[in-house]
Image (tube, rainbow, N blue to C red):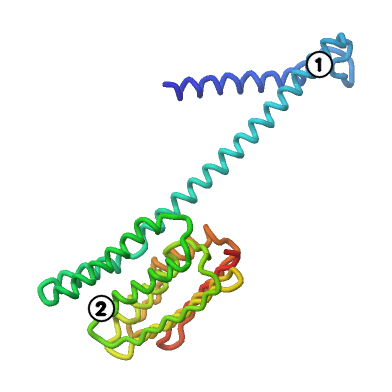
């Protein structure tokens, strides 16, 4: 009810303001049509005090118009910010479902076979889920926390598979205080395991290099895959990553993806941290 009343008052005020603004035009048109004059000087023949009051009134109207425009622009900016924030939260919520479902399936099979290993998996999985739920909703986290999250992910996969995987993760950071949007690199790492390691029976590898220097982070990941099972359609994860980068690091990121025979490479560089 209150909203409807406010809307009604805004409509009445708009009509009054627009009507007032049209008065000079109406008067001028009337004088031209009812006299032989070719032109009319507005307020000609009026008492100076009346003229001053009318001019002051229209200056007031112009001021109200400017304030209204500013208010509308602020509302637009706030709305755009809320839409951006909502989209980011939605995109973050899509990260890692495939991984968590697979891990839960593995846990189900391990409970009776190897209870000690199942307990270790549960602890690591709970840490990752806690990070995804709580830290993952923040605007930024420490880069060192994100690295720990990636390492936990790798350790869980080592415990999960019954095959030898060559995994190398090299880190070179000159400042542990760098802030980064959470759950960015995990998409590329998860992609390497999902489309590479999981489909290879032997000789699977994932090589990762992360460096952070001069307020720039560079993440490079290489993995091999079974070319006979190659999916030419880009996954939801990569689309998710690209959109988040556009929203948070516009013009300050570079994502390069390439495939050569049975090797996949992704390089993500983020500047101006």
**Residue drawn at point x = 54 percent, y = 73 percent:** 212
Kindly state the secondary structure of the residue where label 1 is placed: helix
Residue 33: mark in rendering: 1
Count the labels in the image: 2
Residue 227 visible in the picture: no
Residue 255: mark in rendering: none
Dot 2 alpha-carbon crowd within 10 angstroms: few under 14, some 14 to 19, many 20 or more: some
Which quadrant would the C terminus be assigned to in this image? bottom right
Q: CA distance from mark 1 to mark 2?
A: 92 Å
In primary-sequence order, the first of circles 1 and 2 is 1
Tell me if 183 is positioned left or right of 253 in this view.
Answer: left
Between 107 and 44, the residue placed more toward the observer is 107
Dot 1 alpha-carbon crowd within 10 angstroms: few under 14, some 14 to 19, many 20 or more: few
Tell me if 147 is positioned left or right of 57 in this view.
Answer: left
- Quadrant of residue 164 in the image? bottom left
Name the front one of labels 1 and 2: 2
- Labels 1 and 2 touching (C-beta < 8 A): no
Residue 184: give x, y in percent of width and height: 45, 66
Q: Which residue is mark 2?
A: 159
Between 254 and 127, the residue placed more toward the observer is 127
Residue 259: give x, y in percent of width and height: 46, 82
Kindly state the secondary structure of the residue where label 2 is placed: helix
**Residue drawn at point x = 19 percent, y = 70 percent:** 119
Residue 205 visible in the picture: yes
- Quadrant of residue 123 in the image? bottom left
**Residue drawn at point x = 44 percent, y = 49 percent:** 86
Residue 1: give x, y in percent of width and height: 41, 21
Residue 82: give x, y in percent of width and height: 49, 45
Check the image and report above or below for 112 versus 77: below
**Residue drawn at point x = 67 percent, y = 19 percent:** 19
Q: Residue furthest left?
A: 112
Check the image and report above or below for 48 versus 105: above
């Amino acid at each position: 009810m209150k909203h409807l009343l406010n809307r009604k008052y805004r409509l009445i005020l708009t009509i009054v303001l627009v009507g007032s603004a049209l008065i000079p035009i109406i008067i001028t048109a009337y004088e031209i049509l009812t006299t032989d004059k070719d032109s009319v000087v507005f307020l000609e023949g009026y008492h100076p005090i009346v003229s001053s009051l009318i001019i002051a009134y229209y200056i007031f109207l112009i001021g109200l118009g400017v304030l209204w425009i500013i208010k509308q622009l602020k509302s637009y900016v706030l709305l755009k910010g809320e839409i951006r924030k909502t989209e980011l939260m939605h995109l973050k919520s899509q990260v890692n479902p495939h991984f968590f479902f697979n891990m839960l399936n593995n846990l189900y099979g391990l409970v009776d076979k190897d209870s000690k290993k199942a307990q270790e998996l549960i602890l690591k999985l709970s840490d990752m889920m806690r990070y995804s739920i709580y830290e993952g909703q923040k605007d930024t986290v420490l880069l060192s926390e994100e690295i720990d999250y990636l390492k936990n992910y790798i350790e869980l996969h080592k415990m999960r598979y019954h095959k030898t995987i060559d995994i190398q993760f090299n880190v070179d950071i000159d400042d542990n205080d760098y802030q980064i949007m959470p759950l960015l690199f995990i998409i590329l790492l998860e992609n390497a395991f999902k489309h590479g390691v999981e489909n290879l029976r032997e000789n699977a590898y994932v090589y990762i290099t992360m460096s952070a220097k001069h307020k720039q982070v560079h993440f490079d990941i290489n993995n091999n895959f079974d070319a006979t099972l190659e999916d030419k359609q880009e996954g939801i994860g990569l689309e998710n990553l690209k959109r988040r980068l556009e929203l948070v690091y516009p013009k300050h990121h570079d994502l390069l993806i390439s495939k050569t025979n049975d090797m996949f490479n992704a390089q993500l560089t983020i500047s101006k941290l």
